[in-house]
């Protein structure tokens, strides 16, 4: 299959779009003017059930839906688009709305380090052992998720993380021997040509850094364009590169994003998985828990079982981040924990590697362990899976029960405590 993508400028060229009413098409235009919209022909032709598109998970995952903006914001943009308003006025209104959608969730700006007084805008270093690298050639995607927490990467230049200088990455790694994992992220690094992967990976290999044990690739290509690993013109060269890295003793982990079990059913994705595994790549899976998409424990247990059957390690169940279209996708912490609990009960131990539900918030990755009554007080039991301060990891804490809570900001300390132990802590990474 030859790759083709559709954006706001040409989405009406998708043959199946004719099935949508004029009002539904206009909704896509309104929401897509504020939140990024892009979809690949693989999703359009092989994943979406167009006989039931309104409820299809992949249609909702990629095509903007009415509830993804507040009614006030929707009507404001709709009115401007229907008028003869000039583009500058529309852009001003759009940017004002975008800035109200929390474009910097979890304090990402605080993750950006400095080297010799220079701010490294293509690197994030939030957790001691892991450095995120944003290669400039990988700061787009084969398709955009409507729940994406990195939507500002594609919509607001002032919030963009990107770097093309491999030498700065290596220099930073040399002065931080505590880093064991380099995570290539985006956007989606798998949109890059193999020559760019070679540029960055060979720089790491040539630097011969003993402390770098794992290279991770955060990608949704297995769900949105599996041909990247099979029939793309440089797919074979990419597999050879992965094997070269693995043969040098550095683990290659592909952090795959599967939001629904149907994403693993096509022959294209099954062949891509085989190719990656033959090249020495370990595949782990993660996904947010999303209302209107996958808030069903049976779906999650089915997804985890199928992943294990395909040789994939279930890794994370996340909460939808507090940005963008969160209100459309968010479930409460209580609902998330119950979904996780019911799902994990239905699978064997080999599937129980998945951790969750987890909030990737400012202090770190906070897991909801459950709800319990302790000394007469109903509380959330929580735990740090990762933390800006490594001493927080594995440290349980408690919050007052709040049935409406969807994020850590909605919680208050339990047992009469005035604040959580991590509140008012320095957001910068604690390297110890």
Image (tube, rainbow, N blue to C red):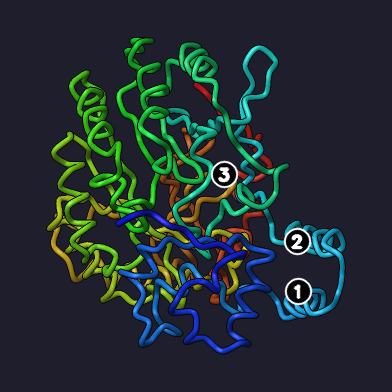
Label 2 vs 1, first from the N-terminus: 1
Quick one: 105 or 138, which is closer to the camera?
Answer: 138
Q: Does residue 213 lie above or below 327 as drawn?
A: above
- Circles 3 and 1: CB atoms closer than 8 Å: no
On the picture, is 187 further left or further right than 8?
left
What SS does tag 2 mark?
loop
- Circles 2 and 1: CB atoms closer than 8 Å: yes
What SS does tag 1 mark?
helix
Label 3 vs 2, first from the N-terminus: 2
Instruction: Give percent across and percent down for residue 266.
Output: 22, 64
Residue visible at 51% across and 14% down in the picture: 167
Q: Which of marks 3 and 1 is in front?
A: 1
Q: Which of marks 2 and 1 is in front?
A: 1
Which quadrant of the view contains residue 281? Answer: top left
Q: Residues within 10 Å of mark 3 (few under 14, many from 20)?
A: many
On the picture, is 268 further left or further right than 376?
left
Instruction: Give percent across and percent down for residue 236.
Output: 22, 36
Q: How crowded is mark 2: few (under 14 residues within 10 Å), some or many (20 or more)?
A: few
Q: How crowded is mark 1: few (under 14 residues within 10 Å), some or many (20 or more)?
A: some
Q: Residue 73 carries which label?
A: 1
- Circles 3 and 2: CB atoms closer than 8 Å: no
Asked whether residue 412 is in view, the answer is no
Q: Does residue 318 lie above or below 17 as drawn?
A: above
Q: Which of marks 3 and 2 is in front?
A: 2
Instruction: Give percent across and percent down for residue 287.
Output: 38, 59
Label 3 vs 1, first from the N-terminus: 1
Q: Residue 100 carries which label?
A: 2
Residue visible at 38% across and 82% down in the picture: 50
Q: Residue 216 carries which label?
A: none
Instruction: Give percent across and percent down for residue 402.
Output: 56, 72
Report the residue marked by disc 3.
Answer: 363
């Amino acid at each position: 299959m030859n790759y083709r993508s559709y954006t706001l400028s040409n989405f009406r060229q998708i043959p199946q779009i004719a099935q949508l009413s004029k009002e539904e098409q206009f909704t896509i235009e309104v929401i897509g003017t504020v939140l990024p919209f892009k979809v690949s022909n693989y999703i359009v032709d092989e994943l979406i059930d167009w006989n039931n598109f309104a409820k299809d998970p992949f249609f909702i995952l990629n095509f903007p839906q009415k509830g993804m903006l507040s009614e006030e914001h929707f009507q404001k943009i709709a009115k401007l688009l229907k008028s003869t308003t000039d583009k500058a006025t529309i852009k001003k209104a759009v940017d004002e709305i975008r800035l109200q959608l929390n474009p910097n969730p979890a304090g990402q700006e605080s993750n950006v380090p400095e080297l010799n007084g220079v701010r490294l805008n293509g690197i994030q270093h939030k957790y001691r052992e892991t450095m995120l690298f944003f290669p400039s050639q990988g700061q787009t995607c084969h398709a955009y998720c409507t729940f994406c927490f990195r939507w500002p990467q594609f919509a607001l230049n002032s919030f963009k993380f990107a770097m093309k200088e491999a030498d700065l990455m290596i220099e930073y790694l040399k002065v931080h021997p505590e880093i064991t994992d380099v995570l290539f992220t985006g956007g989606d690094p798998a949109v890059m040509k193999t020559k760019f992967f070679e540029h960055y990976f060979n720089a790491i290999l040539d630097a011969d850094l003993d402390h770098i044990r794992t290279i991770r690739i955060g990608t949704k290509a297995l769900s949105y364009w599996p041909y990247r690993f099979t029939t793309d013109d440089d797919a074979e060269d990419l597999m050879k590169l992965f094997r070269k890295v693995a043969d040098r003793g550095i683990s290659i982990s592909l952090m795959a994003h599967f939001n629904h079990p149907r994403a693993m059913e096509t022959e294209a994705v099954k062949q891509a998985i085989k190719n990656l595994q033959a090249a020495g790549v370990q595949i782990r899976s993660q996904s947010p828990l999303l209302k209107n998409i996958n808030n069903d424990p049976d779906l999650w247990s089915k997804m985890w079982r199928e992943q294990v059957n395909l040789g994939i390690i279930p890794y994370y169940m996340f909460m939808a981040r507090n940005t963008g279209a969160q209100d459309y996708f968010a479930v409460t912490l209580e609902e998330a924990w119950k979904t996780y609990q019911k799902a994990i009960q239905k699978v064997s131990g080999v599937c129980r590697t998945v951790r969750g539900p987890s909030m990737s918030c400012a202090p770190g990755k906070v897991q909801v362990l459950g709800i319990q009554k302790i000394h007469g007080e109903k509380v959330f039991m929580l735990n740090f899976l990762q933390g800006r301060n490594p001493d927080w990891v594995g440290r349980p804490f408690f919050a007052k029960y709040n049935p409406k809570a969807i994020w850590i900001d909605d919680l208050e300390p339990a047992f009469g405590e005035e604040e959580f132990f991590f509140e008012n802590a320095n957001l910068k990474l604690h390297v110890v």
